[in-house]
Image (cartoon, grey):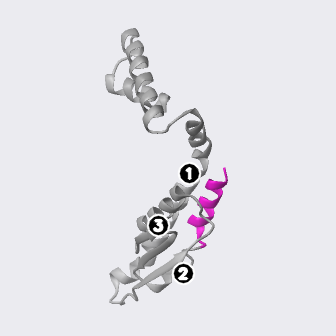
Amino acid sequence: MFVLFFAVWILLNGKVNLEVVLFGLVITAALYFFCCRFMHYGLKRDWDTVRRLPRLLVLFAVLIREIVKSCFALLPFIYTKKEPDSVVARFTTDRVKTETGRVLLANCITMTPGTITGSLRDGEYRVHCLDRSMGLGLDSGCFVEKLEKWEEM
């Protein structure tokens, strides 16, 4: 986090000289100390974030793939008069254990066209699906698999 703060400081200043670097180090150190003290950041948490970054990038690539697949699945509804069979799917998954993982799963579902996560309460998801087929496998799909591996680290 300290490196990120310092990089933003340098980018916002637009130039690099001794004064900017020294003042930036002091300001970013104070900001990092504040984050560690009051926002529960720390070196261990930063290292965990860096360690999990490759798996998060894989999840992002899978999300992009699923968005493209879903766009093609929605084409018949857009270009024909085919009526969608909307449904609200309810499911729970025990494979995603952390709250962050559950929220990431809900966001991945919502970002995929044709599905919207309506609620997430006590590990139970309610997802509005434009078509019944879009609700199949939400509890054990590729997002759940990638998030499960992400949480294992």
Q: Picture coordinates of residue 7 (x, y %)? A: 43, 28
Residue located 57% across and 74% down the image: 139
Tell me which amino acid carries mark 2.
Leu
Position of 6 relative to 93 (above/below): above
Where residue 21 sits, quadrant-wise, is top left
Mark 1 lies on residue: 56
Mark 3 lies on residue: 68
Residue range in magenta is: 140-153
Residue lying at the far front in this picture: please name it.
Answer: 38
Residue lying at the far top in this picture: please name it.
Answer: 18
Task: State the SS at label 2.
Answer: loop
Q: CA distance from mark 2 to mark 1?
A: 24 Å
Residue located 45% across and 22% down the image: 29
Mark 2 lies on residue: 136
Residue 64 in view here = no
Q: Earlier in the sequence, mark 3 or mark 1?
A: 1
Q: CA distance from mark 3 to mark 2?
A: 17 Å
Q: Picture coordinates of residue 55 (x, y %)? A: 60, 51
Q: Picture coordinates of residue 64 (x, y %)? A: 49, 60
Task: State the SS at label 3.
Answer: helix
Nearer-the-camera pick, 128 or 83: 128
Residue located 43% across and 18% down the image: 25
